[in-house]
Structure formats: C-alpha cells, structure tokens
Image: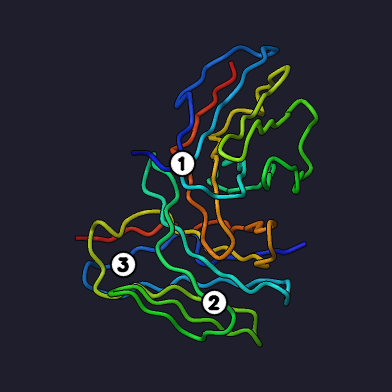
Amino acid sequence: GENVEQHPSTLSVQEGDSAVIKCTYSDSASNYFPWYKQELGKRPQLIIDIRSNVGEKKDQRIAVTLNKTAKHFSLHITETQPEDSAVYFCAASTDSFGNEKLTFGTGTRLTIIP
Amino acid sequence: DTAVSQTPKYLVTQMGNDKSIKCEQNLGHDTMYWYKQDSKKFLKIMFSYNNKELIINETVPNRFSPKSPDKAHLNLHINSLELGDSAVYFCASSQRGTGYTFGSGTRLTVV
C-alpha cells in the first residue's frame, strides 16, 4: 500500500518568513495530493491540493509543488502569520472512483514566532 | 449549517462498555470514512463506504463495526472498549475529485 513520509515533524519560523514542508510517497499510481491544516482541538481542513497533471499550484500565500518522477511534493507558505500556526498534514491517494482512500503523512507542527 | 456532523463530541466510558458514534453529511457526497487520530496526531483510515457499500476495511479489530443506513449517514459502533481505543475519531466525506470534508471529531476516552 501507499506510504507517505513527511518532514520535518516540527518547524519554527519567524513571522514574515517562509515555511516549507516536504513529503514523499511510495505508490507511483497516486495522482491526488491534498494538504490539510489542523488547528488545536479542531478538524483537519483542506487548504490546497494538486493533481498529477500539474507541477505547481498557488493560492495567495500558499503554494504546492509536485515532482512525480521523484515522488515528492512540498507545501510552501510565504509571509507567515501567527494564524498559520497549526499541524499540517500531506496526503496522497489514487483518485479512483469510489475509493479515494487518503494516506496521510505524520504531520508537521508549525509554530510562527511573533 | 454543518456539512459533516458527528455526535457526541466527547465520550468518556469505562473499559468493557459498548458505545456508538454517529455521523451525518449534508453535502450529497457518495463516500464516507472513519479515521482514527491517535495521541501523536497520526491519522489512520479505518473504514470507507460508498453509497452504503463497504469498500475499505483496514486492519481494525472486529470490535469495531461501521453501519451505513443511507449514503448520508455512517455510524461507528465499538464493543468491549479497551484503553487503547482512546483517541479522536473523525468522520469524513468526499465526492470523486474533491478532497475530504471532516467532521469535528469525537474524543473518546476509555477509563
């Protein structure tokens, strides 16, 4: 089955600086890669996703890059703000009909230092 | 109007008891899931249903039994609760081509 590794497990960044979280996956058939943000005591929420036919996607201060050859994808947050502090999860799945099983990474606890 | 709702939000119970967690989604999604999040925050899939049909059943003790009366509901019944069952259980739903929408979670504590 799919295995997703995520690094680093914790990350502290000065407010205004950039943060990068990296993930690798094992199943070359995976073609859908979402990122989730989970604030303390809350549910995971989708913040951005990318499919295998795209190399990069941006949404304001957040961007995700995908390298299918290397089976590697990354989350980039620019101009970090205190409200970006949370646990971030990457995930991967094969977007087959009715079986969108997401395998999650182990999470990165991001702390923004004011 | 909550998209994916779970009840109860908190559940404290003694070892050996049987308990249920309910989940409902009003998004019209075809697929629903149960995930377990342990104390280290790791999210692991337990079950997945598509249009009331079980399609994913990970290596979960058979004390856990999901039930989907219709595609908007997926409940989780747990028999003979053990200390190691303590975790946060998340329900989620999706439609092909969309990411998951998670419920707010049920924090289960077995004492």
For the residue marked with disc 2, what is the amino acid? Phe
Secondary structure at numbered mark 2: strand
Tell me the residue that label 3 is attached to: A13
- The dot on residue A73 is 2
- Give the residue type that dot 1 points to: Asn
Question: How far from the left and from the top, in percent, is residue A45?
Answer: 42, 53
Q: Amino acid at mark 3?
A: Val
> For mark 1, does the 10 Å Cα neighbourhood hold few (<14), some (14 to 19), or many (20 or more) residues?
some
Say the numbered circle drawn on residue A60. Answer: none
Marks 2/1: CA–CA distance:
32 Å
Tell whether B106 sits left or right of B18.
left
Quadrant housing residue B19: top right
Outermost left residue: A114
Mark 1 falls on what kind of element? Answer: loop
Chain under disc 3: A
Q: Position of residue B108 (x, y in %)?
A: 54, 26
Instruction: Name the one closer to the observer, B111 or A92.
Output: A92
Tell me whether the residue at label 2 lies in contact with that at label 3, contact meaning CB atoms closer than 8 angstroms: no
Residue A26 falls in image quadrant: bottom right
Q: Residue at x 61, y 66 (%)?
A: A92
Identify the image quadrant of the N terminus of chain A. bottom right
Q: Quadrant of the C terminus of chain A?
A: bottom left
- The residue carrying pointer 2 sits among few (fewer than 14), some (14 to 19) or many (20 or more) residues within 10 Å by Cα, namely many
